[in-house]
Image: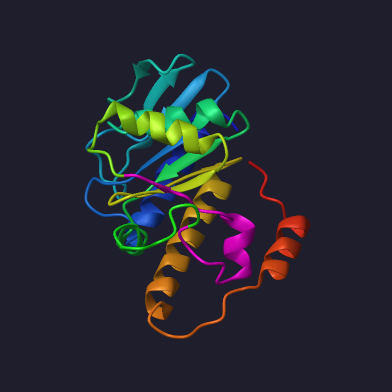
Amino acid sequence: MNESLMRERIARAARSMFDRRLTFGASGNISVRLDDGWLMTPTGASMGDIDPARISKLDSNGEWIGGDKPTKESFLHLAMYGERPRAGAVVHLHSTHSVAVSCLKGIDADDVLPPITAYYVMRVGQLPLVPYHAPGDAALATAVRATASRHHAMLLANHGPVVAGRSLDAATGAIEELEETARLYLLLKDREFVPLSASQVAELKQRFPIDT
């Protein structure tokens, strides 16, 4: 797909997530890998009103070369791509239910959400929690890079999810499944519920390996 069409697809995906209240205000960002660099949503821009022509372009070294200035969280995206050479897109949201889960005391930092549904296992799998860092802290990039070498999805404490996928559709589908599972978990966590068993999870992972 050429760059012009990809710009349109990024804008449509951003607007769709904004309209469905998966992100708010100027929060959240999307990037896509190109042959010669990356496209990223601009800093300070609402995902509900992204102008395709003003989407930022970065070269293969991560330097801004066109469009509006890229998201100030571009380092998160570049850290993910650096560890996941097959990733074609990265999506980061401040989605309500995922952020709420990231603030809970006593959650398992190695695997935040239980396997409530088959589609969560198939699209997200294991979800580690990255410890809190202040916005813009370079140490966050280091923490994300260390986690991204083993996981395509992660939850930033008191911040939100970051997900890489082979394509924009794969990344958006996974992060939406993550947010829905977080919502289900908050509904269920104070009740007795039955997650998928270890054998059911293993079967799903064997049949439907996550391709990132």
Q: Quadrant of the N terminus?
A: top right
Q: Residue at x 47, y 54 (%)?
A: 175
Task: Name above or below for residue 150 compared with residue 201.
Answer: above
Please identify the quarter of the rendering in which residue 122 is found. Answer: bottom right
Q: Would residue 180 appear left or right of 198 to someone viewing this image?
A: left
Does residue 55 appear in this view?
no
Where residue 89 appears, as percent x and y from the top left, is 52, 38
Front residue (pair 6, 138): 138
Task: Name above or below for residue 92 compared with residue 140.
Answer: below
Main SS of the magenta segment?
A: loop
Please identify the quarter of the rendering in which residue 187 is found. Answer: bottom left
Does residue 43 appear in this view?
yes
Q: Magenta span has 128?
A: yes
Please identify the quarter of the rendering in which residue 124 is found. Answer: bottom right
Front residue (pair 160, 149): 149
Q: Residue at x 47, y 50 (%)?
A: 128
Q: Magenta span has 198?
A: no
Q: Quadrant of the C terminus?
A: top right
> Total of numbered circles in the picture?
0
Where residue 18 appears, as percent x and y from the top left, is 33, 55
Where residue 157 appears, as percent x and y from the top left, is 32, 50
Magenta extent: 112-131
Task: Name above or below for residue 107 compared with residue 187.
Answer: above
Front residue (pair 150, 170): 150
Where residue 204 appears, as percent x and y from the top left, is 72, 63
How did the renderer colour the structure? rainbow
Q: Would residue 153 appear left or right of 26 to someone viewing this image?
A: right
Front residue (pair 160, 62): 160
* Residue furthest out toward the bottom: 192
Q: Would residue 113 appear left or right of 50 to someone viewing this image?
A: right
Q: Residue at x 32, y 62 (%)?
A: 21
